[in-house]
Amino acid sequence: MTRVAAVDCGTNSIRLLVADCDPATGEQTDLDRRMTVVRLGQGVDRTGRLAPEALERTFAACREYAAVIKELGAEKVRFVATSASRDAENRDVFVRGVLDILGVEPEVISGDDEAEFSFTGATKSLAGRADLDRPFLVVDIGGGSTEFVVGDTHVRAARSVDVGCVRMTERHLVVDGVITDPPTEAQVAAIRADIEAALDRAAERVPLEQARTLVGLAGSVTTVAGIALGLDAYDSEAIHHARIPYEAVREISARMLTETHAQRAELGVMHPGRVDVIGAGALVLLAVMERTGASEVVVSEHDILDGIAWSAV
């Protein structure tokens, strides 16, 4: 067993996994798994820069994670940064801050690398499932981007496109600095048009129509799953590998785009940091299911974070 720490810093959240991994057997024992919504990508789509307050929120989370990593005695640490830090002109400030706090330099990875990690993390625990047809289409709906990966045990094709729950919300729902709540029909249509164009770009490289099982990752998908399951509070064990039908996703997507902030915030499974962006995230998932004809989505709590951990081993 090798004790590793993996950090995934995305557009909306930063997450930590400390786990014991055995490369000989594929066994993974989680010691600590946590998430903090820091909204690192705040305003990046508009300004091209990481905001000072977003950087400070992220560095505060890094200090917390550094203490956990030290306490648990991880032998190897890998820190991966994704969409927001890829896009930012001042990402050197982010890199220096993380290096000072955690002692490792964040790797600002490409979208294709992000897709590889997501696929490994999501499918490692599905490999023995006889009830799931191959190939898999793994869809990781992040804050700034969405990754599409088709493969069996290995990746056949992958592409990252710049549609995510935060980016779509900031691009289409913010007017004079205020989020429209709930959005207008025209705003929803504009988000949908962006998503459809992104799906066209993804399909240029990834054979979406070949997929037999859709696997959905990240907070938008797991939140939709929690709502569909009628959970009073977030329960990762109940959500992991849940199979959510298309009709439930369609209904929840429509609901998230018509309810107010207060109504969405009352849902027990809803993280406060997702209240304003869940509508856009759910719409991405719905559009993917409609484009691929998927009758259900298999939800995975294992994702890019687990892939990063295995890459460190």
Image (cartoon, rainbow, N blue to C red):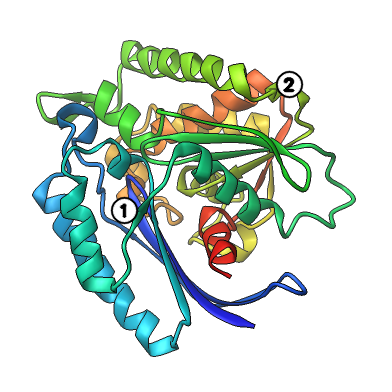
Which residue lies under the disc numbered 1? 272
Quarter-of-image position of residue 116: top right
Between residues 210 and 261, which one lies in front from this camera angle?
Answer: 210
Q: Which residue is located at x 42 percent, y 35 percent?
A: 145
Residue 7 image offset from top left, x and y in percent: 41, 63
Q: Which residue is located at x 46 percent, y 82 percent?
A: 74
Between residues 44 and 109, which one lies in front from this camera angle?
Answer: 109
Quarter-of-image position of residue 128: bottom right
181 sits to left or right of 289:
left
Disc 1 on helix, strand or loop?
helix
Q: Is residue 190 above or below residue 44?
A: above
Q: Which residue is located at x 9 percent, y 50 percent?
A: 52
Disc 2 on helix, strand or loop?
helix
Q: Are marks 1 and 2 in contact (CB under 8 Å)?
A: no
What amino acid type should be assigned to the residue bearing mark 1? Pro
Residue density around tag 2, few if under 14, some if 14–19, many if 20 or more, within 10 Å:
few
Which residue lies under the disc numbered 2? 209
What amino acid type should be assigned to the residue bearing mark 2? Glu
Which residue is situated farthest in the right direction here? 130
Q: Is residue 298 above or below residue 7?
A: above
Q: Quadrant of the C terminus?
A: bottom right
Mark 1 or 2, nearer chain start: 2
Residue 198 image offset from top left, x and y in percent: 48, 19
Q: Which residue is located at x 53 percent, y 53 percent?
A: 304
Between residues 235 and 201, which one lies in front from this camera angle?
Answer: 201
258 sits to left or right of 287:
left
111 sits to left or right of 302:
left
Q: Is residue 30 above or below residue 127?
A: below
Between residues 237 and 207, which one lies in front from this camera angle?
Answer: 207
Residue 115: mark = none
Q: Nearer the viewer, mark 1 or mark 2?
A: 2
